[in-house]
Amino acid sequence: MNRTIMAGTDWWTDCDDVVAMRVLLWAERERLVRIAAIGLNACMLHSVASLDAFLTAEGRPGLALGLDRQAEDFGGNPPYQENMLEYPHARKSNDDAEDAVRMYRRCLAEAEDRLDIIEIGYPQVLAGLLHSSGDDLSPLTGLELVRTKVGKLWMMAGNWEDEKYGLENNFARNARSRRAGHEVCKLWPTPITFLGWEVASDILTGGTIASAEDPVFRALRDHGSPNGRSSWDPMLVLLACIGDEEEAGYRVVKGKASVDAETGANSFLADSLGKHGYVIKMKPDREYQAAIDRIMESAQR
Ligand SMILES: [Ca+2]
């Protein structure tokens, strides 16, 4: 199938983004997807350099990276990023990445076929893309580019256990993520599949990695999770790379998702014709866990 995808990550204080990046690179090696670019939506001192170092250590140097440089208001100080700087890396600072919205516009303008977008972080780059105007890359607005060039958006966001009310970090972290979550749910013109907090919080992965020098294991240890971490981001990435909810072991509740722009709380109105959907697991937790842990081992050095 080899669909082209762009992926957004907060690559912030948590380590499940690191597990998820290994899943994404595995999916490319397996020719499930081709990765066009990765956008960072939290901006920390070593964001670009550490991601570049990790991708290089995993055998995929030179991937296009974009960054939201305004996203300095998420706080935190993850030790895993500084420790990744031990690996060789070409991009030394955040100045070495393109603006994330511009990079997404470039990829969409150049795409011959529709591509999918994966998001495992904060939604403000996606909202910024929707609001972007025509420029030297394309006369189309961001909304028009998404409408004509994106197949589907796959997001780890929200808590959909109670359709009336959920509160989850990616939507609710700060004022910009809340507003952006509101705008993406309201304006995004393609189908969106959400994997919510409730799906993955009890499924710990990465804990079976045997080598203490493995880059993913080191990140888990630096986070204080050497026995594995909740699988929000890796489960969403694996689902998106398989590209079919049922095949990936989920059923979908369709409808319309909303996010409160002030509180970041999410809610859902079920509707079989709706453009949005959240997934519910159809298999025992251990099967999702084993699938991701097998992928972790496939890349062990
Ligand atoms: Ca994340």
Image: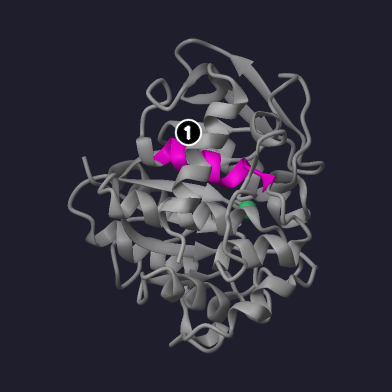
Task: Tell me residue 139's x, y (percent).
Answer: 29, 62
Is 236 included in the stretch rendered in magenta? yes
Q: Amino acid at mark 1?
A: Ile
- Relative placement, left or right, of 13 versus 113 is right
Q: Is residue 244 above or below residue 18?
A: above
Task: Tell me residue 259's x, y (percent).
Answer: 69, 35
User: In the image shown, does 32 or 229 lie closer to the viewer?
Assistant: 229
Res. 78 visible in picture: yes
Residue that appears at 65% across and 72% down = 43
Tally of numbered discs: 1
Image-quadrant location for residue 189: top left
Residue that appears at 57% across and 64% down = 211
Residue range highlighted in magenta: 229-240
Q: Which residue is mark 1?
A: 192
Task: Tell me residue 169's x, y (percent).
Answer: 74, 46
The N terminus appears in which quarter of the rendering? top left
User: In the image shown, does 257 or 41 lie closer to the viewer?
Assistant: 41
Image-quadrant location for residue 226: bottom right
Residue that appears at 43% across and 31% down = 191
User: In the image shown, does 245 or 84 lie closer to the viewer?
Assistant: 84
